[in-house]
Image: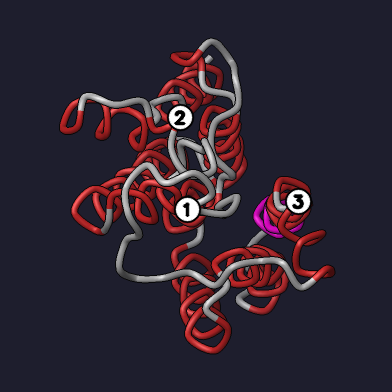
Protein backbone atom coordinates (compact mmCIF):
# COMPACT_ATOMS: atom_id res chain seq x y z
CA UNK A 1 0.00 0.00 0.00
CA UNK A 2 2.83 2.40 0.82
CA UNK A 3 4.49 1.81 -2.54
CA UNK A 4 1.19 2.25 -4.36
CA UNK A 5 0.61 5.57 -2.59
CA UNK A 6 4.13 6.74 -3.41
CA UNK A 7 3.72 5.77 -7.07
CA UNK A 8 0.44 7.70 -7.24
CA UNK A 9 2.13 10.69 -5.61
CA UNK A 10 4.94 10.39 -8.15
CA UNK A 11 2.50 10.53 -11.04
CA UNK A 12 0.75 13.56 -9.57
CA UNK A 13 4.08 15.32 -9.05
CA UNK A 14 5.05 14.55 -12.62
CA UNK A 15 1.75 15.93 -13.86
CA UNK A 16 2.67 19.39 -12.55
CA UNK A 17 3.67 20.86 -15.90
CA UNK A 18 5.82 23.71 -14.67
CA UNK A 19 6.70 24.99 -18.11
CA UNK A 20 3.02 25.47 -18.86
CA UNK A 21 2.21 26.86 -15.40
CA UNK A 22 5.05 29.39 -15.20
CA UNK A 23 4.29 30.82 -18.63
CA UNK A 24 0.58 30.98 -17.80
CA UNK A 25 1.24 32.71 -14.46
CA UNK A 26 3.92 35.20 -15.48
CA UNK A 27 3.08 35.83 -19.14
CA UNK A 28 -0.60 34.97 -19.33
CA UNK A 29 0.10 32.80 -22.38
CA UNK A 30 -0.14 29.14 -23.35
CA UNK A 31 3.33 27.80 -24.12
CA UNK A 32 1.70 25.11 -26.25
CA UNK A 33 1.01 27.81 -28.84
CA UNK A 34 4.63 29.00 -28.87
CA UNK A 35 7.78 27.63 -30.44
CA UNK A 36 7.49 23.89 -30.84
CA UNK A 37 4.33 23.69 -28.73
CA UNK A 38 6.02 21.51 -26.12
CA UNK A 39 5.54 22.24 -22.39
CA UNK A 40 9.07 21.16 -21.47
CA UNK A 41 11.70 23.51 -20.09
CA UNK A 42 13.70 23.54 -23.32
CA UNK A 43 10.87 25.09 -25.30
CA UNK A 44 10.18 27.55 -22.47
CA UNK A 45 13.86 28.57 -22.50
CA UNK A 46 13.93 28.93 -26.29
CA UNK A 47 10.85 31.13 -26.39
CA UNK A 48 11.03 33.07 -23.10
CA UNK A 49 14.68 32.85 -22.12
CA UNK A 50 16.35 31.68 -18.89
CA UNK A 51 14.15 33.74 -16.54
CA UNK A 52 11.38 31.21 -17.10
CA UNK A 53 13.36 28.39 -18.69
CA UNK A 54 15.74 27.86 -15.78
CA UNK A 55 13.08 27.64 -13.04
CA UNK A 56 11.01 25.38 -15.29
CA UNK A 57 13.99 23.05 -15.66
CA UNK A 58 14.78 23.06 -11.92
CA UNK A 59 11.17 22.38 -10.99
CA UNK A 60 10.98 19.54 -13.52
CA UNK A 61 14.06 18.02 -11.88
CA UNK A 62 12.54 18.51 -8.43
CA UNK A 63 9.28 16.78 -9.32
CA UNK A 64 11.23 13.70 -10.33
CA UNK A 65 13.56 13.85 -7.35
CA UNK A 66 11.02 14.28 -4.54
CA UNK A 67 8.88 11.14 -5.04
CA UNK A 68 11.83 8.97 -6.06
CA UNK A 69 13.89 10.02 -3.04
CA UNK A 70 10.99 9.63 -0.62
CA UNK A 71 10.12 6.17 -1.92
CA UNK A 72 13.76 5.04 -1.83
CA UNK A 73 14.22 6.21 1.76
CA UNK A 74 10.89 4.86 3.03
CA UNK A 75 10.78 1.55 1.16
CA UNK A 76 13.83 0.91 -1.01
CA UNK A 77 15.26 1.14 -4.49
CA UNK A 78 12.45 -0.85 -6.11
CA UNK A 79 9.82 1.53 -4.81
CA UNK A 80 12.00 4.52 -5.70
CA UNK A 81 12.27 3.32 -9.29
CA UNK A 82 8.49 2.93 -9.55
CA UNK A 83 7.80 6.36 -8.07
CA UNK A 84 10.43 8.00 -10.28
CA UNK A 85 9.07 6.22 -13.33
CA UNK A 86 5.57 7.39 -12.43
CA UNK A 87 6.81 10.99 -12.24
CA UNK A 88 8.32 10.61 -15.71
CA UNK A 89 5.05 9.19 -17.01
CA UNK A 90 3.16 12.10 -15.47
CA UNK A 91 5.48 14.56 -17.19
CA UNK A 92 4.88 12.86 -20.54
CA UNK A 93 1.09 12.47 -20.13
CA UNK A 94 0.07 14.91 -17.40
CA UNK A 95 -3.23 14.46 -15.61
CA UNK A 96 -3.69 18.21 -15.28
CA UNK A 97 -3.52 18.72 -19.04
CA UNK A 98 -6.07 16.01 -19.74
CA UNK A 99 -3.41 13.37 -20.51
CA UNK A 100 -2.40 15.28 -23.62
CA UNK A 101 1.21 15.50 -24.69
CA UNK A 102 3.56 16.86 -22.07
CA UNK A 103 7.35 17.01 -22.10
CA UNK A 104 10.03 14.52 -23.05
CA UNK A 105 10.99 13.43 -19.52
CA UNK A 106 14.68 14.38 -19.60
CA UNK A 107 14.84 16.75 -16.61
CA UNK A 108 12.32 14.65 -14.67
CA UNK A 109 14.35 11.51 -15.36
CA UNK A 110 17.45 13.29 -14.10
CA UNK A 111 15.65 14.23 -10.91
CA UNK A 112 14.36 10.68 -10.45
CA UNK A 113 17.88 9.29 -10.68
CA UNK A 114 19.20 11.89 -8.27
CA UNK A 115 16.61 10.56 -5.83
CA UNK A 116 17.13 6.85 -6.44
CA UNK A 117 20.82 6.69 -7.34
CA UNK A 118 22.60 10.02 -6.80
CA UNK A 119 25.88 8.92 -8.38
CA UNK A 120 24.05 7.91 -11.54
CA UNK A 121 22.07 11.15 -11.62
CA UNK A 122 25.14 13.34 -11.18
CA UNK A 123 27.17 11.41 -13.76
CA UNK A 124 24.30 11.47 -16.23
CA UNK A 125 24.05 15.23 -15.79
CA UNK A 126 27.77 15.45 -16.45
CA UNK A 127 27.33 13.53 -19.70
CA UNK A 128 24.56 15.92 -20.73
CA UNK A 129 26.71 18.98 -20.03
CA UNK A 130 29.75 17.64 -21.92
CA UNK A 131 27.78 16.53 -24.98
CA UNK A 132 25.79 19.75 -25.06
CA UNK A 133 28.95 21.86 -24.76
CA UNK A 134 30.49 19.97 -27.69
CA UNK A 135 27.46 19.89 -29.99
CA UNK A 136 24.95 22.55 -28.84
CA UNK A 137 22.24 20.01 -29.62
CA UNK A 138 19.95 19.61 -26.60
CA UNK A 139 18.45 16.51 -28.19
CA UNK A 140 21.83 14.81 -28.67
CA UNK A 141 22.83 15.66 -25.09
CA UNK A 142 19.54 14.33 -23.74
CA UNK A 143 19.65 11.06 -25.68
CA UNK A 144 23.32 10.49 -24.82
CA UNK A 145 22.83 11.16 -21.12
CA UNK A 146 19.74 8.96 -20.89
CA UNK A 147 21.41 6.15 -22.81
CA UNK A 148 24.28 6.14 -20.32
CA UNK A 149 22.16 5.76 -17.18
CA UNK A 150 21.93 1.98 -17.19
CA UNK A 151 25.68 1.66 -17.71
CA UNK A 152 26.47 4.00 -14.83
CA UNK A 153 24.02 2.18 -12.57
CA UNK A 154 25.80 -1.09 -13.33
CA UNK A 155 29.32 0.35 -12.94
CA UNK A 156 28.44 1.95 -9.59
CA UNK A 157 26.99 -1.31 -8.30
CA UNK A 158 23.37 -0.31 -7.85
CA UNK A 159 20.78 -3.13 -7.61
CA UNK A 160 19.09 -4.52 -10.70
CA UNK A 161 15.90 -2.38 -10.45
CA UNK A 162 18.02 0.75 -10.85
CA UNK A 163 19.96 -0.76 -13.77
CA UNK A 164 16.70 -1.78 -15.46
CA UNK A 165 15.27 1.68 -14.79
CA UNK A 166 18.30 3.22 -16.46
CA UNK A 167 17.83 1.07 -19.54
CA UNK A 168 14.11 1.83 -19.70
CA UNK A 169 14.71 5.57 -19.28
CA UNK A 170 17.21 5.51 -22.13
CA UNK A 171 14.75 3.77 -24.45
CA UNK A 172 11.91 6.09 -23.42
CA UNK A 173 13.89 9.28 -23.96
CA UNK A 174 15.15 8.08 -27.34
CA UNK A 175 11.59 7.18 -28.37
CA UNK A 176 10.27 10.63 -27.46
CA UNK A 177 13.12 12.19 -29.44
CA UNK A 178 12.47 10.20 -32.60
CA UNK A 179 11.49 13.36 -34.51
CA UNK A 180 14.74 14.99 -33.39
CA UNK A 181 16.67 11.94 -34.56
CA UNK A 182 15.01 12.18 -37.96
CA UNK A 183 15.96 15.85 -38.22
CA UNK A 184 19.51 15.08 -37.18
CA UNK A 185 19.70 12.45 -39.91
CA UNK A 186 18.50 15.02 -42.46
CA UNK A 187 20.81 17.72 -41.08
CA UNK A 188 17.84 19.90 -40.11
CA UNK A 189 18.11 19.94 -36.31
CA UNK A 190 18.80 23.43 -34.93
CA UNK A 191 21.45 24.05 -32.33
CA UNK A 192 20.30 25.47 -29.02
CA UNK A 193 20.79 29.18 -28.40
CA UNK A 194 21.30 30.33 -24.83
CA UNK A 195 19.73 33.69 -25.65
CA UNK A 196 16.08 33.51 -26.54
CA UNK A 197 14.81 34.31 -30.00
CA UNK A 198 11.95 36.71 -30.63
CA UNK A 199 9.08 35.46 -28.54
CA UNK A 200 6.22 33.86 -30.45
CA UNK A 201 7.91 33.68 -33.85
CA UNK A 202 6.59 30.75 -35.86
CA UNK A 203 9.28 28.13 -36.07
CA UNK A 204 11.43 29.92 -33.52
CA UNK A 205 12.18 26.62 -31.84
CA UNK A 206 12.56 23.06 -32.94
CA UNK A 207 11.02 20.17 -31.07
CA UNK A 208 12.76 20.31 -27.71
CA UNK A 209 14.33 17.68 -25.59
Where residue 193 appears, x then y in whole percent? 41, 70
Q: Marks 1/3: CA distance? A: 17 Å
Judging from the image, what secondary structure is the residue with disc 3 in? helix
**Relative to 180, is 100 above or below?**
above
Where residue 135 appears, x then y in whole percent? 58, 83
Q: Main secondary structure of the magenta part?
A: helix
Q: Please tell me whether residue 57 is drawn above or below residue 184 in the rendered image.
A: above
Q: Which residues are magenta?
A: 161-167
Label 3: how many Cα within 10 Å (few below 14, some 14–19, many 20+): some
Structural crowding at the residue carrying mark 2, measured as other residues with C-alpha within 10 Å and reported as few (<14), some (14–19) or many (≥20): few
Which residue is pictured at 54% across the width and 67% down the height? 138
Mark 2 vs mark 1, CA separation in Å: 12 Å
As helix, strand or loop, the secondary structure at mark 1 comes to loop
Residue 5 position within the rendered picture, expressed as x and y whole percent measured from the top left = 48, 17
- For residue 182, what is the image quadrant? bottom right
Residue furthest top as drawn: 98
Q: Nearer the viewer, residue 117 or 64?
A: 64
Residue 173 lies within the magenta run? no
Left or right of 125: which side holds 101? right
Q: Secondary structure at mark 2?
A: helix
Residue nearest the observer in this picture, 129 or 40: 40
Checking the image for residue 41, the label placed there is: none
Q: Nearer the viewer, residue 94 or 186?
A: 186
Label 1, on which residue?
Answer: 204
> Which residue has dot 2 on it?
33
Determine which quarter of the picture holds residue 140. Answer: bottom right
> Would residue 198 appear left or right of 187 to someone viewing this image?
left
Residue bearing the label numbered 3:
179
Amino acid sequence: MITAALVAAGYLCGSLTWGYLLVRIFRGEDVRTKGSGNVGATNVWRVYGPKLGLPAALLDVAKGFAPAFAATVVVGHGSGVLAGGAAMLGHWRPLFLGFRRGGKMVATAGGAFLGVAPLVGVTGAGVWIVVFALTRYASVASISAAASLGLWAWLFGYPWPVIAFGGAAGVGVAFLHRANLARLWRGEENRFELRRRNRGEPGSAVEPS
